[in-house]
């Protein structure tokens, strides 16, 4: 949970954050100001999340990634002359420039070497590009320390993320119908209605439970129809990554598509579902990491982190899927409940 | 529906995999160096395309980044604005050291950092300049708007229609956003749906009987203009003796008394009067917060049902104990009357000094929410007025939002919308118009669990006043009072977004009312429309050569419009009530329609049903600022002749902002 220190906002911060304070309020900005976030994986999606969170005015952002920067990456934070360096070191300067008031820290170690103590120092952990087993391990550690956890990925034209906020309390403004005005006049259509603040609590489940769930039997028919393609694709991609120790790559396009189909069929078989249900056309669209897909998924994910830290407005529970090649929709579903 | 689209795409891919069709080589390997660019079916189109990005602000910065990273390499970005510190929370191509510089120029520089090999041309200019003609627009494969105001959107819409170039329109406000594609003949255009009228207040509310903080804020802005800016007769700040509510003997007596005391106050301009005392704050204070208030009090009919105002005395400003919470930003503290007076005094001093230093034609100041003295002045004066009228006072923070029409804005919404724009562009480049969508970004999942909800594009409105084959509108106004100048400025440019209109009266003689050529019709400007024999039912033929836009206007003469409006523009005149019944005595026969019967007031006012396709309503106040998108959570009513059932459903499911 975010440590609620008594933080004051300086005049400089008030000027910089003016347009967002007017949206989510000063309290939320103060809570952001105290948040220490760990971001694992700095590809295209990671870069978008890093940009969005840094701009929002969190206390610190730790970038953890052991990989080396390559050319034509969707990570726009890497100047061309830094290709060949470690990705977080290559990106550091541009991230810091986005907002000098945020502490940007880099760590080039492999995340698998990080133990419990490391994670316990953060208020939010967000993982990208990880094999699902590693995400599960980290989520379990976060749970133990009551730390909100996100894991997300972008593959080609689309992407997804999972969120675990344990037991999350938040407040939201709800509309109350406008009272009759004085002088006996009735309220006109466009009069602003009153709002009042209401508190809620949402319960989440661990990643392991969600990953092992079978939504085809847990969700109602309509919900399952809506997300089945998203869900099966996500599982296929994550299992591909675990098995092949890499993501689908253009150099092996045909064989990777075949492999993905094989994995998909296996998943469907395990779920006792009809083989023809999800066509393979979607696997044509999962290569690389398209900038607009990273922008969409990274934008939604970062805003969810902001919501969680500020305890303001209903967060997504517990999966988000986006596909820019098929239904052009950003869909939310609660899987594993 | 979605399922069949997917199958269609898949089967096309499969069947064309070996056919070598250039647009369908989905299975062909992308180039090794370009793993993050779309597969080569798109590659070529992207590489060959030329993109115009209109606006380098919140959406524009994100969009430029996406375009460069996606392989677009010929981009022109245009923006007239310079960078402000309040932009830096989201316009991430700019840093602190860039404040004051051109957005387009700096955006280009930063975007080149993502790929120095792309061609980006930056124009620090207004897209509405005549340089950007139809030929200019024709050079682009796709135009992408990243704007924040209706006038520019409407203008670019027309230019793209004229040039037959696809346009991707978008907008954001807070957590919400929208993207849509516009193509002549294939979809709705930007102007197919009338936008909600801009909020304006009747003059008497502003001048005589304010009841809300916004009335006082508008009054204070008008006061600024009267004292330091370009005086507008519609922005009078003194008591309105013509207020229909006030009619009575007491008022006219007071008027005479005041006139004899102060020497015919109403005839001297506010500015000239202030000059006489060299902007002495105590004199200004005395007039606006004491004498004028006393005058209003004498118009006793106004106060039979309202709390009367209390004049303030310069020598006896009330002190108030502040019971506000700590931890607030300085600007969020509400000023006491004494603090207001202090701020008023110091800001007047600064503003007066500034206006003295101006020379020549530019001898007026323009109100700017980001200018400290301008903002202090409005905060102080509006709160003093609020105090006088027992209206809750507002902090400078809140006054700034209301006076400056600030729309809260964050990085993430703009990032998502810019991503969605590029996806629409991909579909356009692939020639897959049928896959283009109107996409909504919702603040929470809608009924279909979607936070990003696409919806089919609507086809063009057959009666659209811009894109239909023979555009027509009807304008209600008073032909004896409306001058040609006003007609051009407020109706043609202001409401109808023309930029260089030519107008002919359809009287068989080809009378030229307005010519876009400089100097040709100057002598017409101060005359009233009736001087040209324009009367009820007269048609005007308007042309904007630059926008390649022809519009026929039918004039309907009305002595008075609702709420003292100067004019109303309507798309479909058949929805108006007949004028004839008004003058007869006795009860009116009820009509079979559900719309309200016409008013029986002798002043011939027309009841405009709120549900009409009203394109624009101009009031007497508050039109000097840019129109920002307004946020509405209800479905748009009353568009029976445009909307389909599915559209209404779509509108009610998603969070709507009006672009």
Image (cartoon, grey):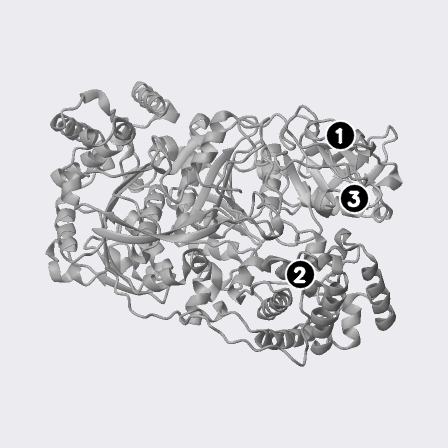
Q: Nearer the viewer, mark 1 or mark 2?
A: 1
The answer for which chain carries disc 3 is B
| Nearer to the camera, B215 or B305 | B305
**Residue B588 numbered tag:** 1
The residue at which mark 2 appears reads as B219
Q: Which residue is found at the position 19% from the left and 34% from the top? A: A236
Q: Earlier in the sequence, mark 3 or mark 2?
A: 2
The correct choice, above or below, for B210 with respect to B430 in the image is below
Report the chain holding disc 2: B
Q: Evaluate if marks 3 and 1 touch, with contact meaning CB atoms under 8 Å apart.
A: no
Whether residue B280 can be seen here:
no
Q: Chain of mark 1?
A: B
Which type of secondary structure does the marked residue at label 1 adopt? loop
Say which of B352 and A205 sits in front: A205
| Distance between mark 3 and mark 1 Cα atoms | 49 Å
Disc 3/disc 2 C-alpha distance (Å): 37 Å
For residue A333, what is the image quadrant? top left
> Do tags 3 and 1 sit on the same chain?
yes
């Amino acid at each position: 949970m975010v440590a609620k220190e008594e933080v004051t906002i300086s005049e400089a911060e008030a000027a910089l954050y003016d347009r967002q304070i007017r949206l989510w309020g000063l309290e939320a900005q103060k809570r952001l100001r105290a948040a220490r976030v760990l971001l694992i994986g700095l590809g295209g999606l990671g870069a978008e999340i890093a940009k969005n969170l840094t701009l929002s005015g969190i206390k610190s952002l730790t970038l953890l990634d052991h990989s080396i920067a390559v050319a034509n990456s969707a990570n726009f934070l890497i100047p061309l002359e830094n290709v060949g360096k470690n990705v977080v070191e290559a990106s550091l300067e541009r991230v810091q420039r986005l907002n000098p008031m945020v502490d940007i820290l880099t760590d080039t170690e492999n995340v698998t070497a990080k133990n419990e103590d490391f994670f316990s120092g953060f208020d939010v952990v967000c993982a990208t590009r990880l094999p699902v087993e590693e995400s599960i391990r980290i989520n379990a550690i976060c749970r133990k320390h009551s730390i909100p956890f996100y894991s997300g990925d972008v593959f080609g034209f689309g992407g997804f993320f999972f969120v675990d906020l344990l037991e999350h309390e938040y407040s939201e403004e709800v509309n109350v119908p406008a009272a009759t005005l004085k002088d006996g006049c009735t309220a006109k259509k466009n009069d602003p209605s009153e709002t009042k603040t209401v508190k809620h609590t949402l319960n989440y489940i661990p990643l392991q439970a969600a990953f092992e769930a079978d939504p085809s039997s847990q969700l109602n028919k309509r919900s399952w129809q809506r997300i089945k393609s998203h869900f099966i694709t996500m599982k296929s991609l994550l299992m591909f990554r675990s098995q092949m120790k890499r993501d689908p790559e253009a150099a092996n396009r045909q064989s990777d598509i075949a492999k993905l189909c094989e994995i998909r069929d296996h998943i469907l078989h395990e779920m006792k579902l009809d083989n023809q249900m999800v066509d393979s056309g979607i696997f044509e669209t999962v290569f690389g990491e398209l900038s607009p897909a990273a922008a969409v998924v990274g934008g939604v994910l970062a805003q969810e982190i902001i919501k969680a830290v500020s305890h303001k407005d209903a967060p997504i529970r517990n999966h988000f899927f986006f596909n820019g090649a098929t239904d052009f929709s950003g869909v939310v579903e609660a899987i594993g409940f | 529906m979605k399922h069949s689209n997917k199958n269609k795409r898949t089967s096309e891919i499969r069947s064309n995999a070996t056919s070598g069709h250039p647009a369908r080589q989905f299975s062909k390997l992308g180039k090794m160096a370009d793993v993050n660019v779309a597969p080569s079916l798109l590659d070529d189109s992207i590489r060959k395309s030329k993109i115009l990005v209109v606006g380098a602000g919140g959406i524009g910065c994100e969009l430029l980044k996406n375009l460069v990273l996606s392989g677009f390499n010929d981009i022109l970005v245009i923006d007239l604005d310079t960078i402000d510190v309040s932009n830096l929370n989201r316009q991430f191509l700019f840093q602190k050291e860039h404040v004051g510089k051109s957005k387009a120029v700096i955006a280009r520089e930063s975007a080149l950092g993502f790929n120095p090999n792309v061609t980006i041309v930056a124009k620090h200019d207004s897209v509405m300049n005549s340089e950007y003609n139809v030929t200019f627009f024709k050079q682009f494969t796709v135009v992408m708007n990243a704007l924040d105001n209706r006038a520019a959107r409407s203008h670019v819409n027309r230019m793209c229609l004229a040039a037959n170039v696809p346009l991707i329109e978008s907008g954001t406000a807070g957590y919400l956003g929208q993207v849509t594609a516009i193509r002549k003949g294939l979809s709705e255009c930007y102007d197919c749906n009338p936008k909600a009228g801009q909020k304006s207040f009747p003059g008497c509310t502003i001048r005589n009987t304010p009841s809300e903080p916004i009335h006082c804020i508008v009054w204070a802005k008008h006061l600024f203009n009267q004292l330091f800016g370009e005086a507008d007769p519609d922005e009078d700040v003194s008591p309105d003796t013509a207020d229909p509510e006030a009619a009575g003997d007491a008022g006219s007596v007071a008027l005479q008394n005041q006139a004899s005391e102060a020497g015919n106050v109403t005839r001297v301009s506010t500015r000239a009067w202030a000059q006489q005392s060299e902007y002495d704050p105590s004199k200004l204070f005395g007039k606006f917060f004491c004498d004028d208030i006393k005058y209003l009090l004498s118009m006793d009919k106004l106060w039979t049902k309202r709390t009367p105002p209390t004049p303030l005395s310069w020598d006896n400003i009330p002190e108030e104990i502040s019971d506000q919470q700590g931890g607030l930003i300085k600007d969020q503290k509400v000023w006491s009357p004494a603090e207001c007076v202090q701020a008023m005094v110091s800001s007047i001093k600064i503003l007066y000094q500034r206006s003295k230093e101006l020379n020549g034609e530019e001898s007026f100041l323009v109100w700017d929410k980001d200018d400290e003295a301008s903002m202090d002045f409005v905060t102080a004066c509006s709160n003093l007025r609020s105090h006088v009228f027992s209206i809750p006072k507002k902090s400078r923070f809140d006054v700034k939002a209301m006076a400056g029409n600030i729309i809260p804005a964050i990085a993430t919404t703009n990032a998502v919308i810019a991503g969605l724009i590029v996806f629409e562009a991909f579909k356009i480049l692939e020639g897959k118009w049928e896959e283009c969508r109107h996409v909504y970004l919702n603040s929470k999942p809608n009924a279909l669990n979607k936070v990003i909800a696409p919806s089919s594009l609507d086809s063009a409105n057959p009666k659209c006043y811009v894109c239909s084959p023979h555009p027509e509108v009807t304008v209600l106004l008073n032909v004896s009072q409306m001058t040609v100048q006003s007609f051009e400025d407020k109706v043609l440019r202001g409401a109808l977004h023309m930029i260089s209109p030519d107008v002919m009266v359809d009287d068989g003689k080809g009378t030229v009312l307005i010519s876009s050529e400089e100097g040709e019709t100057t002598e017409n400007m101060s005359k009233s429309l009736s001087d040209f024999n324009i009367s009820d039912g007269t048609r005007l033929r308007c042309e904007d050569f630059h926008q390649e836009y022809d519009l026929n206007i039918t004039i309907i003469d009305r002595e008075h419009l609702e709420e003292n409006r100067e004019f109303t523009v309507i798309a479909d005149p058949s929805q108006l009530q007949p004028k004839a019944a008004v003058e007869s005595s006795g009860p009116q026969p009820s009509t079979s329609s559900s719309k309200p019967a016409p008013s029986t007031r002798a002043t011939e006012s027309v009841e405009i049903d709120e549900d009409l396709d009203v394109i624009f309503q101009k009031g007497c106040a508050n039109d000097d600022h840019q129109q920002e998108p307004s946020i509405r959570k209800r479905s748009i009513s009353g568009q029976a002749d445009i909307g389909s059932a599915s559209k209404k459903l779509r509108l009610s499911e998603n969070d709507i902002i009006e672009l």
